[in-house]
Amino acid sequence: MTLSYSTDIVVFGGGVAGLWLLNRLRNEGYGVILLESNTLGCGQTVASQGIIHGGLKYAMTGSLTGASNVIADMPARWRNSLQGSIEETFNIDLSNVRVTSDHYYMWSDTGMRSKLKAFLGSKSLIGRVRAVPESNYPSFLADAPAEGTLYRLPDFVIDSSSLIEILADHQPKGIYQTSPSTIEFLRDDSGSVTGTLIKTKNKTVRIATQRIIFCAGEGNQALIEKAALKTPQSQVRPLNMVYVKRPKLPMVFMHCIGSNFSLTPSLTITSHQDKMGITTWYLGGELAESGVTKGPTEQIHAAKKLIFSLFPWIEFDTATWGCFLINRAEANINNNYRPDDACLIEEKNVLVAWPTKLTLTPVLADKTIEMLHATSVKATDREHCAELDSLFNRPSIANAPWS
Ligand SMILES: Cc1cc2nc3c(=O)[nH]c(=O)nc-3n(C[C@H](O)[C@H](O)[C@H](O)COP(=O)(O)OP(=O)(O)OC[C@H]3O[C@@H](n4cnc5c(N)ncnc54)[C@H](O)[C@@H]3O)c2cc1C
C-alpha cells in the first residue's frame, strides 16, 4: 500500500538548523515536514557550549575573515529575539529560551596583558570589549587572587536544550522519526530529486516536494552520497570535550587566555546543570582541540592540570570528571579550510545546509529563504497530512552528554 502526499519542502535533521528552518519556512507559508533519525538536537546542538558570540575568539586566532564580519552583529540580533522582539529579528519567538549567562568573560594572566591590550585596541574591536574593574567582578571570581585582567565580551550563553525544546514546541505537527535505511530519493529524468520514499512496516510513503534540505550535521555526508550529489562536501573537526561536576560549584562563563604565547583561549568554560541539578563545568577551547589524540585518562589529567592552576581557590576533591569525543560538522568548501560563515549549497533540487556555528543559524535561514525565493520555490501552504502522524513517532529531545 502506498500513501502519496506532497509538500513544498522536506527537511532532514532536527538539530538547531533543521528546527530553526522548519519555523522560518512555515512562517513564510511553506508546507514543510521534518525527518529526524534519532532525537532532536542529539548531534552537535545539545552538546554545544551555547555561546552566542560575536566572533572575537576567531579574530584572536586569526581565523576570522572580513567576509564573515556578519557574526559581530549576532549577539544583538539574538538578544532582540530572546526578548520577544519577533518582527525585527528572526520571526521566531525565543522569549522562553533559557539564557544561562547574560555575559561572557575573558580572563588573561598578567603575561599576556600588553599583547592583549594591543589586540583589543585595534580599530575593529574598540568599544566591543571592556576591562572589568575588580570591584565589579562576577561572584565566581570574588575569591580569585588578582593576578590577571578580566574583560567582558558582548557574548552571552543560552541553554541549547531549551532552544531545541522551544523550536520544537512551536511546531506540534510534522516532525517525524525515521530511520535512514528506510529512505530513498525520487528523481525525474534529468536526475533532479523530486521527493522522498519512506518504507514503513505496512506502507510505502511517497512524498513529492519542490525542494529537500539536508540539515543533518555529521549525517549530511551520507545523505549527499545517497542523493548522488557532486558539489556539496562536508568535513568534520573532532573535539575531546571535558566536564567536571560537583554540587555547589560556582557557575563560570569565561575564556582563559595565557598558558602559551598565542591569544588562542586555552580553555573555554561554560556551566550547566545536569539532570540532578548538579553544576557542571563544560570545558572546550584549545584543551578540546589538542586533546583529540589523548585517551580519557590523559585528557582528564590535562584538564585537571589547567583547572587547578587557574582556579586554585576552588575545591575539586569531591568532583566527578569525564570526557568524550564529538565532531563538529562543517562544509568542506576549500580544501579543509575552516569556514567562518553559514554555508548553503544547492544541487538537483537539494539544499545542503551547515550553520557552522549555533550563533549563525539565523543567517543560514536567511540564506535559505533568499535562495528559495531566487529559484521561484512557491509557498503553497499545504494541508497537514494526519495519516503521517499514525505512521511515524515524534522524536523526543536529546539529553546533554554531561547528563
Ligand atoms: C562541543 C561543541 C561545542 C560547540 N559550541 C558552540 C558554541 O558555544 N557556540 C556556537 O555558536 N556553536 C557551537 N558549536 C557548533 C554548533 O553546535 C553547531 O554548529 C550546530 O549545533 C549545528 O547544528 P545542526 O542542526 O546543523 O547539526 P546537529 O546539531 O548535529 O543536528 C543534526 C541532526 O540531524 C540528525 N540526522 C543525522 N543524520 C540524519 C539523517 N540521515 N536523517 C535525518 N536526520 C539525521 C541528527 O540526529 C541530529 O539531530 C559547538 C559544537 C560542538 C560539537
Image (tube, rainbow, N blue to C red):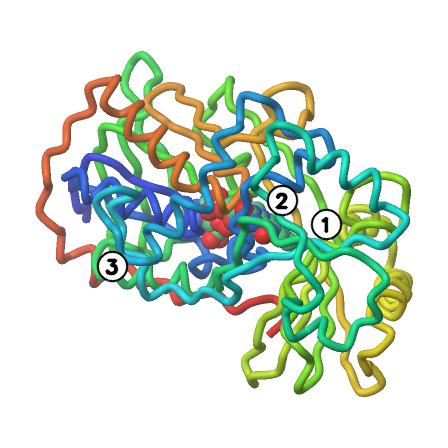
Q: Residue furthest top?
A: 190
The C terminus - image quarter: bottom right
Q: Can residue 110 be seen in this view?
A: yes
Give how far apart the Cα atoms at labels 2 and 3 are: 27 Å
Q: Which residue is drawn at 32% across and 42% down?
A: 21
Q: In this view, does 51 lie above or below 341?
A: below
Does 319 sit left or right of 175 as displayed?
A: right
Q: Residue 254 carries which label?
A: none
Q: Which of 157 and 300 is in front in this view?
A: 157
Q: Position of residue 144 (x, y in %)?
A: 79, 72
- 3 or 1: tag closer to the N-terminus: 3
Residue receiving disc 2: 328
Residue receiving disc 1: 239
Task: Judge: label 2 CB < 8 Å from ligand 1.
Answer: yes
Please, what is the three-letter code of the amino acid marked with disc 2?
Answer: Arg
Q: Position of residue 249 (x, y in %)?
A: 69, 80
Q: Which residue is drawn at 49% across and 45% down?
A: 359
Q: Which of 278 and 32 is in front in this view?
A: 278
Q: Residue 170 carries which label?
A: 3
Q: Is mark 2 on a helix, strand or loop?
A: strand
Query: Do callouts 2 and 1 mark residues in contact (Cβ within 8 Å)?
Result: yes
